[in-house]
Image (tube, grey):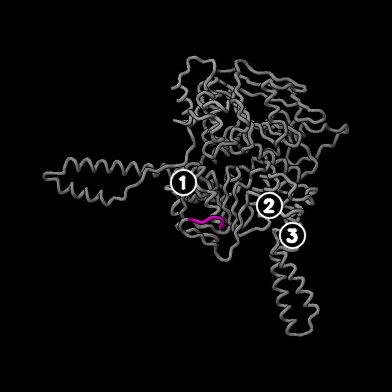
Amino acid sequence: MLLLSCTNLSRGYGATPLFDGVEFELHAGERVGFVGPNGAGKTTLMRILAGLDEADSGKVTLHAGARLGLLLQVAEFPTGRTLFAEAKSAFDELLATQREFERVAEELAAATDEAQHRQLSAKFDRLSELLRHHDAFELDHKVEGVLAGLGFKASDFQRDANTFSGGQQRRLLLAKLLLSAPDVMLLDEPSNHLDITTTRWLENYLAQQPEGMLVVSHDRYFLDKVTNKTFELHDRKITSFPGSFKQYVRLRDEKFERELKEFEAQREYIEKQEEYIRRAHYGQLAKQAQSRVKTLDKLDRLEKPTKVSGPDIAFSEVTRSGDVVFHTEDLTKRFGTRTLFENLNFDLPRGKRLGIVGENGCGKTTLLRILLGDEPATSGLVQRGHLVFPGYLDQHLAILDPDKSVLRAVWPDDDPQQTEQKMRDLLGSFGLHGETVEHPIKSLSGGERSRAALAKLTVNGANLLILDEPTNHLDIWACDSLEQALKAFEGTCIVVSHDRYFLNRVADLLIVFDNGTTEVVYGNYDTYELLRQAREQAEKASPGRKSGGEDAPARRTGGAPAGDAKAAKPKRKFPYRKVPDIEADIAKTEQRVADLEAALQTPDVYKDANRLRETMSDLEKTKGALALLYQHWEEAVELNG
């Protein structure tokens, strides 16, 4: 069902419009990711759709009595209203209907006139059906579920809404929008201020909703999980792409390559015709030349295509370090009675990229400081390899002097061989050009400061990059550029990040902090997700069961010590198999998943609908088989001994 449409929508500031002639439709069930470079006009367009701003020309039509809701950025709550009451106010219209239903019920019970009784009875039935359709008698349960999903505790429910932090208040605004369930949801950065667990809940919740949605987000993993369509705002126009964010990236690149070939082919054709006209504009061939002139005049000339792209980022060549960059044994860190991590064991080989992920305050930055030697461990061993030269990028970019120009802030103090041209070339490789390099660091945008700090690391010759939340200030395309640069980097990298898409693309292994435990995962974030889901399924099947192991895809450490009483072994869910045999099957199945995902990146598979369906079906079945193999492996590790 069509919910919202835009026709010839334009809006500009000054001489250059933000967008011009924009047209699109939004249907029920479409969850659209809305992407585009910073400053392209995404927020302005969302405000126009919500009626908070006006277009210069064009029309926005909300169809068939549909309701529209926008996720607000600033919270304003009545004084003295509790969290629960404010969230429940999302149902004000339904609550008014409920009160009307109760009033009609009382009048119906007291009615003696037969005509009045029939009229009230019909109204009672109509209101009853309306309330039943909207589950109006389960409102408290709905409110509790959404508030809990967004990270609020039951003890928070009766607190004054105005006593919460800004981030918590924005989560309350999100809760109200989800509960009100408008036919069209406009979500501007809905995952901001959410931890990974809460974001995961929101992804699952939104993916199951029937409403139409337009979602602006820099969280590519979130977009990939939630959206089934993408609008790209670029060059003042909107282009629609079917499918998830990953599909959008592939289809956009294919579209660009196809249009570029068409443009180049037309340009070559025009050049040949113009050359012929120059040679044959007189004499016997003049008539043919004139005919070709007319043909060219009628030709609908193609514009050279462009696509949104990030800055060029490239790290310099580095000195080769030893084969093992870090080796840890039983690494433990405590502050008083609080344990951040304990008995953490891992090796980081040269050339690998280690990702560290977990909630704020769990100990990620502390682990970095211990590895760098800036803070002692409570116990355990840290060994740094031979010829390891670390470069540390902290979240606050303290490596840069805010008062110096970009050129001088990045320039190394003790390298007389550096020249201004070399430094400008280096900064250019990080997307910092021209007059920008003369500006003081404090005047730059967050993304520009991040790239200047990365340039500082490479000019210092670091062969071990330690990056704490490097994507915080980068847009989608700058993140993509950094990912490509890190994969091409010849040294070793440790990255602390909450950006799951980023970790998926760069990490070879992960350390996951989760509820007082640390887990070493030999793979990227998707590998961890498969393990986590397999454990959840196993725990549902066998409540109270614990899993672990030392030498396979993941290793868990930390947490409360086991009791003295030896628990009885649970019954087997799978037939007995040797652990190495299961691991061999896991490796084969992971390769099969990788092959099928690679097949879905090729354009040929999309030319045959049957082949596409078979490939996607095979991929889902293989992922399911892999999840079962992980469960089988965990059971074998636990019970075979």
**Sequence-earlier tag: 1 or 2:** 2
Callout 1 secondary element:
strand
Residue 200 quadrant:
top right
**Sequence-earlier tag: 3 or 1:** 3
- Which SS does the magenta portion mostly show? loop
Whether 540 is drawn above or below 386: the answer is below
Q: Tell me the crowding category of disc 1: few under 14, some 14 to 19, or many 20 or more residues within 10 angstroms, Cα based.
A: some
**In the rendered structure, does residue 556 fall within the stretch colored magenta?**
no
Residue at x-position 58% and y-position 32%: 506
Numbered disc in front, either 2 or 3: 2
Q: Which residues are magenta?
A: 50-55
Contact, mark 2 vs mark 3 (Cβ under 8 Å): no
Callout 2 secondary element:
loop
Do we see residue 72 in this rendering? yes
Callout 3 secondary element:
helix
Do we see residue 611 in this rendering? no
* Mark number, residue 139: 3
Q: Which residue is mark 2?
A: 76
Residue sitting at the far left:
283
Contact, mark 1 vs mark 2 (Cβ under 8 Å): no
